Amino acid sequence: MSIQSNLENIKSSLPENVTLVAVSKTKPVSDLMEAYNAGQRIFGENKIQEMVEKWEQMPKDIQWHMIGHVQTNKVKFMAPFVSLIHGVDSLKLLQEINKQAQKNNRVIDCLLQIHIAEEETKFGLDEEELSSLLNSNEFQEMKNIRILGLMGMATFTDNQEQIQKEFTHLKSIFDKLQSLNTENCQLNTVSMGMSGDYKLAIDCGSTMIRVGSSIFGGR
Ligand SMILES: *Cc1c(COP(=O)(O)O)cnc(C)c1O
């Protein structure tokens, strides 16, 4: 199957309100260009250095999403162009993004990553940390970031029931935040679902799926 036909297959099954992020990490620019030529404009990368290199080489109407864990000292490299940062999981990181966005005279859109999986290793905030971040004065004074929603990753398991429970949990946290609409917090996005579980994620209320291997093949 070609990248183009993989993309077409996936897109034809998506509800209108669901955005597809083509996760292109580790793949060469030629593969990304194949997706670009098939109409794809949103790409997700998990390493800042790699994203910067691809951004330099590729057409400038691409929206680059950072989906990986972000180190504070590397924010500056993507601040001029990144379109959405999915994995924000601390006030400190958000402050750095705000600072670098300000330097670039722009507003950077972010999602807050919530820990929904069983594994200890997956990054993210719990509900209490989320609420204290959103209620902090520091956050409320940030003018150069905008929180568009939440992101989560389910446990790596074949147990569909468990994955469904975790996705539903994320959606319920999102729903509880709906009253919170300020200048820098405009919630409309739930980023959940990857190649193996995006259909289930959509059933659970996902509005943004991050799909890599089903488009570009295994890594
Ligand atoms: C790699 C990655 C994906 C895509 O995974 P696939 O199984 O290849 O679709 C989605 N989200 C994150 C955070 C990733 O790191």
Image (tube, rainbow, N blue to C red):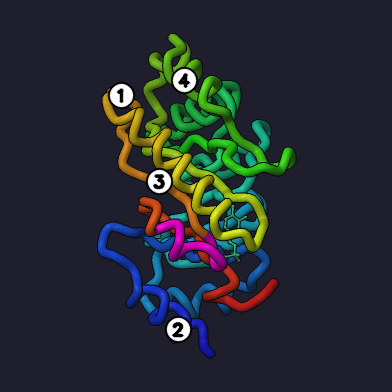
Q: In the rendered image, which residue does mark 2 sit on?
A: 4
Is 122 left or right of 2, judged from the image as shown?
right
The Cα–Cα distance between marks 2 and 1, rounded to whole angstroms, is: 39 Å
SS class, disc 4: helix
- What amino acid type should be assigned to the residue bearing mark 1? Leu
Residue closest to the eye, 51 or 109: 109
Contact? badges 3 and 4 (CB < 8 Å): no
Distance from disc 4 to disc 1, alpha carbons, whole Å, reads: 11 Å
Task: Name the residue beneath numbered marker 3.
Answer: 190
Locate ligand 1 by image quadrant. bottom right
Look at the image and tell me whether residue 133 can be seen.
yes
- Image coordinates of residue 134 in percent, x first then y, are 43, 20
Q: CA distance from mark 2 to mark 3?
A: 26 Å
Is mark 2 in CB contact (under 8 Å) with mark 3? no
Q: Do the numbered discs 2 and 1 sit on residues whose CB atoms are within 8 Å?
A: no
**Residue at screen point 45% across, 34% down:** 104
At label 2, the amino acid type is Gln
Start and end of the magenta stretch?
194-202
Whichever of labels 2 and 1 marks the residue nearer the N terminus, that label is: 2
Q: Nearer the viewer, mark 2 or mark 3?
A: 3
- The span from disc 3 to disc 4 (Cα, nearest Å) is 17 Å
Q: Earlier in the sequence, mark 4 or mark 1?
A: 4
Q: Is residue 148 magenta?
A: no
Residue underneath mark 1? 180
Q: Secondary structure at mark 1?
A: loop
